[in-house]
């Protein structure tokens, strides 16, 4: 009798295990079918955002880690017919073509503690009507008269997170002063005109000295 009870108990245990396995397999199949039939999430199209100058934190004063000072490194040869020279002391950007000065525009530069880095760079990014993401609140500011970048963005420096470049401004009366957090602010009409005359790769030289007339 004990042997029969033991046999029946073992048989019942096997049946319970098989039933449990069947239920688990069924639930797994239902889950897989549900995932397959459900529409997969599509990555939303995120507007291109550029951090404006008040989102940029330059290297600490005296640090050479993220930019090339002209007085320490020999500038690379300029291969393009067009290039830009920014004079921080003159508060102007000069456009040269075939070594001839074509036009100059007034600019605003980085204020004390947020100085525009000097060195030789290249245009890395060009955006018309850029969006701007507030660096602290995450608010997205669409193109328009309230956008701190104005209507054009020409980036020429980045540490992989922050950016420095030319852009317009809603406050054109500040152009000509040292008021930015590293970026080069321009009058809106001027940055639109500059945007049409440069391209990705255009050399940008930033120096403290005034530009000697040629």
Image (cartoon, helix red, strand yellow):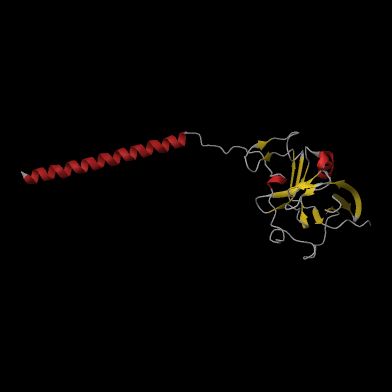
Compared with residue 106, is residue 35 higher up or lower down, i.e. above or below? above
The answer to which quarter of the image holds residue 12 is: top left
Compared with residue 132, is residue 203 higher up or lower down, i.e. above or below? below
In the depicted view, which residue is nearer to us: 86 or 95? 86
Looking at the image, which residue is at 81% across and 56% down?
205
The answer to which quarter of the image holds residue 74 is: bottom right
Compared with residue 119, is residue 50 higher up or lower down, i.e. above or below? above
Q: Percent x, y for residue 140?
A: 65, 37
Q: Percent x, y for residue 180?
A: 75, 47
Looking at the image, which residue is at 41% across and 38% down?
32
Q: Is residue 106 left or right of residue 164?
A: right
In the depicted view, which residue is nearer to us: 146 or 125? 146
Indicate the quadrant containing the N terminus: top left, top right, bottom left or bottom right: top left
Looking at the image, which residue is at 82% across and 46% down?
177
Q: Percent x, y for residue 120?
A: 78, 58
Indicate the quadrant containing the C terminus: top left, top right, bottom left or bottom right: bottom right
In the depicted view, which residue is nearer to us: 110 or 138? 110
Q: Is residue 23 left or right of residue 50?
A: left
Q: Is residue 101 left or right of residue 150?
A: right
């Amino acid at each position: 009798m004990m042997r029969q009870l033991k046999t029946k108990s073992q048989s019942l245990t096997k049946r319970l295990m098989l039933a449990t396995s069947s239920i688990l397999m069924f639930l797994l199949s239902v889950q897989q079918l549900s995932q397959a039939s459900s529409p997969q999430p599509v990555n939303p199209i995120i507007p291109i955002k550029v951090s404006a100058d008040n989102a940029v934190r330059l290297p600490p004063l005296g640090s050479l880690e993220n930019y090339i000072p002209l007085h320490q490194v020999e500038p690379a040869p300029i291969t393009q017919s067009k290039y830009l020279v920014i004079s921080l002391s003159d508060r102007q950007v000069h456009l040269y073509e075939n070594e001839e000065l074509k036009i100059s525009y007034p600019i605003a530069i980085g204020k004390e503690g947020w100085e525009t880095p000097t060195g030789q760079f290249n245009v890395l990014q060009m955006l018309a009507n850029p969006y701007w993401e507030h660096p602290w609140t995450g608010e997205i500011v669409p193109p328009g008269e309230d956008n701190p970048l104005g209507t054009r963005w020409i980036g020429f420096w980045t540490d992989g997170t922050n950016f420095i470049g030319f852009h317009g401004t809603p406050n054109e009366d500040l152009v000509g002063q040292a008021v930015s957090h590293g970026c080069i602010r321009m009058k809106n009409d001027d940055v639109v005109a500059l945007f049409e005359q440069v391209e990705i790769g255009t050399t940008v030289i930033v120096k403290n000295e005034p530009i000697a007339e040629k």
